[in-house]
Structures are given as C-alpha cells and as structure tokens.
Image (cartoon, rainbow, N blue to C red):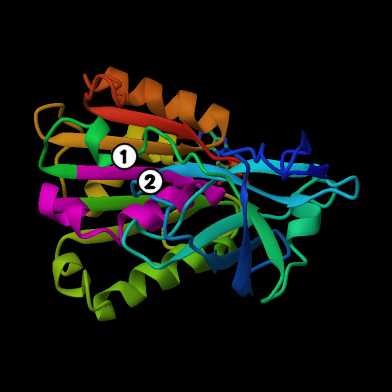
Amino acid sequence: MSVDATGAATGAARVNPNAPTEETVLAVEHYTDRLFRFRITRPRSFRFRSGEFVMIGLPKEDGRPLLRAYSVASPAWDEELEFYSIKVPDGPLTSRLCHIQPGDKVLLGKKPTGTLVLDALLPGKRLYMFSTGTGFAPFASLVRDPETYERYDEVIVTHTCREVAELTYSRNLVADLVNDPLVGEMVEGKLRLYTSCTREPHDHQGRITDLIESGKLFEDLGVTPLDPATDRGMICGSMEMIQDTKALMIKAGLTEGSNASPAEFVIEKAFAG
Ligand code: A2P
C-alpha cells in the first residue's frame, strides 16, 4: 500500500485522479519582506483560463498536502505557471513557501476555477481591474492575455497598497509589457496602470473606494465616470475591499456577473494563508 498526495491510502490500482501533481520551482523573486513571486513547471495537461485560481501547496511532515488557493498570475498561453504571494510569518503555508528555491517541489491542484474571467463579463468598451495587495495576481494573468485587448478598447488596472515598495511587481510587469512579443503592440495606448498608496506618499494617494467615490480616479485618468453601457469591472482584494468596491459598482448601475450568467462586473477574494 502507498499514500497518494491527498494522504489517502491507495492500492497500486487506486491512484487518486484528482491528486495534485508535483511541480518544480523554476524561479523565485522577493519584493519585500511580505511579498514574492515564483514560477513553476506546467504540466501539459494543466489547462486554465487567464484570471482563474488553483490550489498550490507543500507536503506536510506527515505526508498530507497543505494546500491554499492561489490565482495564477501567468497568462493561459504561458508554458510555465507564475504565482504572486504574500508571506505571513505564522501562516501555515506561506511561512514555508517563502523559503522555496529553484529545483524545489511544490504541489499543483488539478482543477483551476474562478470568476475573474473574460467570459463572465458582457461585451463592453472599457475594462477596469480593481486590485489591492496580492489581489493584483489574476490581473497579472489577464493583462498578458491578447484576448483582453481583442475584447476591449481600453484596459485600466488599479493597484492600491499600503507602501510604494508593494507596487514593484505590478509596476515592473506592466512597464515590461511593451516589450512583450505577444501583447507588446496591443497594450500600447490601451493599457493603463493606476497605482495608489494609503500609508506612504505616492503619485496617487488613498483607497480605491475613496478615489472612485470622489471621482478623482476618473479625473486623473481623463475618462467619464462608470457607465454600465460601456464599462466592465473586475475586483480582487480583501473581503472588505471587495464589498466596498462592489457597492460602488452597484451604485453606478453595474450588475454582478458569473460564469453561468455574465454581466457587468465580477469579484474574487485575494487569497492568503
Ligand atoms: P489602508 O491602508 O487604508 O487599510 P492590506 O495590505 O491590508 O491587504 O491592504 C491593501 C490595501 O487595501 C491598503 O492600501 C488598504 O488601505 C486597502 N484597503 C483595505 N481595506 C479596504 C477597503 N475596505 N476598501 C478599499 N481599500 C481597502
């Protein structure tokens, strides 16, 4: 008898088809003492839509896996998988995951899913992606997907963090996109990143909710306020941020969509643990 990756006892003939696969860490980059990204191998059979999340983990000492949901930060076409993670000093998974090095193994779930996907939105002209903290991760996937630019005339990503250093990942990623062989030409004039900080001086200051409510976001961007006829929204951040931003979408006349029933905005919690 052996033990499979779910910790369940298996006979040789009873391999769990849903058990996570073991993947190899290819690269790790640390941004602050709270944030890092890592890239891993992608099995040929692993299919997902840009913006979805999947379970990622490490085996525990007793052999059972410790898994948490992570948004895939790389686009669906990429041969590797990228993840953007918080480090929680006493977090069961991230306190260990933050020490991974190239060559190490991590577990990858087999069932990516989620609502921050282009198919959950009705067609529109301008797509907003509102994020705080590691909530930027699914948008790191979507801004690298050509389909995003095929569907929208304008793509505006907002990223709000406490401190300027926490914006490094999003700022570098978007700045480098103009040189991307696949989407480089598509992003020019279409994609804009709007960053704000809440606890340190920065070009833009304050919570995204306050910037929407006061109209300052739209003034700064030189666009008309939210309009359900043209604008679509995706929201990813803490539970509170989602609820507060969602309330502003509803106030502007947008309705929440899902995979089964596409509409004008969609939400997903930023995962941590
Ligand atoms: P603030 O500094 O005012 O709390 P965190 O690091 O706690 O996940 O927060 C990431 C960013 O999200 C911070 O800039 C934080 O602002 C902001 N934030 C926290 N709660 C909300 C909320 N309810 N609505 C909008 N932004 C929020």
Ligand 1 position by quadrant: top right
Identity, as a three-letter code, of the amino acid under mark 2: Gly
**16 with respect to 101 (left or right):** left
Quarter of the C terminus within the rendering? top right
Identity, as a three-letter code, of the amino acid under mark 1: Val
Residue 64 falls in which quadrant of the image?
A: top right
Residue furthest toward the front? 13
Q: Secondary structure at mark 2?
A: loop
Quarter of the N terminus within the rendering? top right
Residue beneath the point at 25% across and 76% down: 178
**Image position of 102 with respect to 249: above or below:** below
Residue beneath the point at 42% across and 53% down: 45
Query: What's the magenta region?
Result: 127-154
Query: Which residue in the protein does label 1 denote?
Result: 117
> Where residue 34 sits: x, y (%)?
70, 59
Q: Secondary structure at mark 1?
A: loop
Tag 2 and tag 1, C-beta contact below 8 Å: yes
Identify which residue, 35 or 224, lies in the foreground: 35
**90 with respect to 258 (left or right):** right
**165 with respect to 99 (left or right):** left
